[in-house]
Amino acid sequence: MSSVLKIDQFVKATPSQVYFACTHAIGLTEWMCDFATVAPRPGGRIYLWWHGDFYSAGEFISLEQNKSIVFTWRARQDPAPSQIAIILKEKNSGTLVTLEHTLPDGDYWVKNSLQFHQEWTLTFANLAQVLETGLDKRTFDRPMLGINMSDFNAGIASAMGVPVNDGIRLDFLPEGMGAFKAGLRKDDVIIELGGKPIINDYGSLVKALQGKKGGDKVEVVYYRGPEKKTATMELSKRPVPQIPWEPSGLAKSIRAKYDEGLDALEKAFSGVSEADANRRPGPEEWSAREVLAHLVQTERHWLENLEDVIGGYPRLSDDWAGNCRTHVAATAAAYKTISGLLDEMKRLSNEMVAFTAALPPDFTARKASYFQVANMLLEGSLPHILSHIDQIQSAIQS
């Protein structure tokens, strides 16, 4: 005989906002899972995945817009599918969200029912926080290393003299954060953190940080070229970024960031000949012009990402494939000159600022999505540009 776990969670958000968060891939990743692909219609797929390779796969049984969602649920270790119903009722200027998880008969379900109840309680409490404040507890309760990542593969490892092909290669490191204080620098390759292996996957960092908090100290093992090193790193508490909550204010702040980055690029290329900009320091390294082409491609990706987040349907991908050298070279060739690439950077920055200023009200009301976009644009573009200035200058000087 089946049993039903029931959880009630009040959310200070409209039923339509809650319904969106439960039926769109973007919404689901903001409070529940790390990756999702869905087709919200009867018979359509619902696949949810978490770092650590836990997942659930199922299909929608029925949907009544802004009122109810019913789908099957079969987690990786479950011996059979179960059923989830999410029921939405408008109440006190918010929404009463009721979860009903129908469990099949059997010892497995009896043994795990308490754990299921605890996990659903925490998960739906996070739904409330995300919709009400824009902050995902899973992210902001997790400490920071203070790193930015760069691509890493066998070819890069060989060129750098690193004797391993798996790990996370560091890019820009903010001074004052744990990694920089511990002595790590750009192009170091982390292979172990807190006794857990680190591979070419951001999820391995997430797993290594599970259960850790700001102030904790962990041992990090890394390569600097061929030399293997060990350091003790103090994890930093994750600050909550302060963002403008009006699109016009956000656009103004982004414009200032872009202007600083574009000015740095103009200075880096001032007086540089096309021949010097085209010279590669080594067979596996980019020329200064190719670095600029990479920055152009990154701005295009961020425009695409903003479009995806607004629509609620992200472009599917298995993983990040790294920077495609062929595409970088093609972009560099297409614009022919340094000035052509710099003009494209300016055009893309103008497009992003205009796009941000025109964000629609129904999107800005989705606090988690808006917060994610604002944080990405304010904390992403300028550091990314500045992190490549030394690379540009080194390529030119070579």
Image (tube, rainbow, N blue to C red):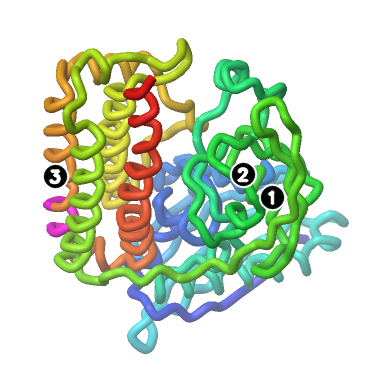
Residue at 18 percent of width and 51 percent of height:
259
Q: In the figure, 298 relative to 381: above or below?
A: above
* Residue 194 % position (x, y): 77, 51
Camera-side residue: 187 or 63? Answer: 187
Q: Taken as a whole, is the magenta stretch helix, strand or loop?
A: helix
Q: In the rendered view, does 101 fall on the left or right side of 272? A: right
Disc ID at residue 203: 2
Which image quadrant for residue 202? top right
Mark 1 vs 2: CB contact within 8 A: yes
Q: In the rendered view, does 309 fall on the left or right side of 33? A: left
Q: In the rendered view, does 4 fall on the left or right side of 345? A: right
* Residue 183 % position (x, y): 64, 50
Name the N-terminal-most of marks 3 and 2. Answer: 2
- Residue with the mark numbered 1: 207
**Alpha carbons under labels 3 and 2: distance apart:** 32 Å
Camera-side residue: 10 or 238? Answer: 238
Q: Secondary structure at mark 1?
A: helix
* Residue 229 % position (x, y): 75, 39
- Residue with the mark numbered 3: 351
Residue at 81 percent of width and 47 percent of height:
195
**Alpha carbons under labels 1 and 2: distance apart:** 6 Å
Camera-side residue: 282 or 255? Answer: 282
If the image is split into quadrants, where does the N terminus sit? bottom right
Camera-side residue: 43 or 185? Answer: 185
Looking at the rendered structure, the kind of residue marked 2 is: Gly
Q: In the figure, 280 relative to 146: above or below?
A: above
- Give, as a single range, the part of the protein colored magenta: 354-359
Residue occupying the far bottom of the picture: 92
Mark 3 vs 2: CB contact within 8 A: no
Looking at the rendered structure, the kind of residue marked 1 is: Lys
Mark 1 vs 3: CB contact within 8 A: no
The answer to whether residue 56 shows anywhere in this view is no
